[in-house]
Amino acid sequence: PESVRIDLSDGVLTATLARPEKKNAITQAMYAVLAEATRRARTDDAVRVLMFKADGDSFSAGNDIADFIALGSQKGGGQVVDAPVFQFLKALAELDKPAVAAVRGRAVGIGLTLLLHCDMVVVAEDALLSAPFINLALAPEAASSLLLPQVLGHQRAFEVFALGEPIDGRTALAWGLANRAVPADQVDAVAADLAGKLAARAPNSIRKTKRL
């Protein structure tokens, strides 16, 4: 089965993380699909909104560590910037159409930092968002050390990074990291509704507004 499903309907290109048995931990193969979908969202006129969601009870447990170790140990494997994870993050940073995320359960690492590149975020009230990079002796990824303080302010962002402890969906809403916090069983429907509203807006105007 595909670990990422891509569907286009009514102008919304939906990328669904579909590895629930591994809490949607993301592999390089999955990043390659996400990168392709994100590039398509920018270049395909049929796509007006990109939406990220997930199967199962977790948005994403973060990067698949075993997969990343394998990537890092490749001899003569080319430049790190050629890796699918970097291709995805570059495509996301360059995306000039709206991106929406629907988050249930745990959102760890990239599961949180991905949200900083989205324009509208719907979280479950009981979702748990965390960035445990320091606990793993890693540096924050995906420009999150720049973007998270812009959203939360320095002190809150520092707490998220330094302690690595999760914040729940209600806190994420109160701190400005999400647009809506709703019961878990309503997350996908509310996100789809917002994505539909965005898709109905004047596409050129919304792209220019996002770019500004």
Image: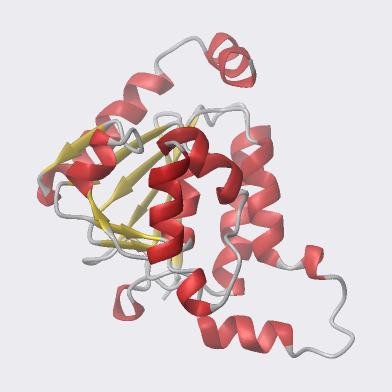
Drawn side of residue 39 relative to residue 98, left or right = right
Residue 91 percent location from the top left of the image: 67, 45
Q: Residue at x 50, y 9 (%)?
A: 202
Vertical relation: 92 (above or below) 68: above
Q: Nearer the viewer, residue 84 or 151?
A: 151
Q: Which sits in the foreground, 77 or 117? A: 117
- Direction from residue 126 to residue 199 in the image, left or right: right
x and y percent of residue 133 in the render? Answer: 50, 69
Whether residue 7 is visible = no
| Quadrant into which the C terminus falls | top right
- Residue found at x 58% / y 84%: 67
- Please identify the quadrant where the N terminus is shown: bottom left
In the depicted structure, whether residue 181 falls above or below residue 210: below
Query: How did the renderer colour the structure?
Result: secondary structure
Task: Choose between 93 and 162: the one closer to the eye.
Answer: 162
The answer to whether residue 87 is visible is yes
> Vertical placement of 56 versus 92: above or below?
below
* Residue 41: quadrant of the picture: top right
| Place of residue 159 in the rendered image (x, y in percent of width and height, measured from the top left) | 39, 54
From the top left corner, tell me how far across and down residue 3 is, in percent.
45, 70
Q: Is residue 4 above or below residue 147?
A: below
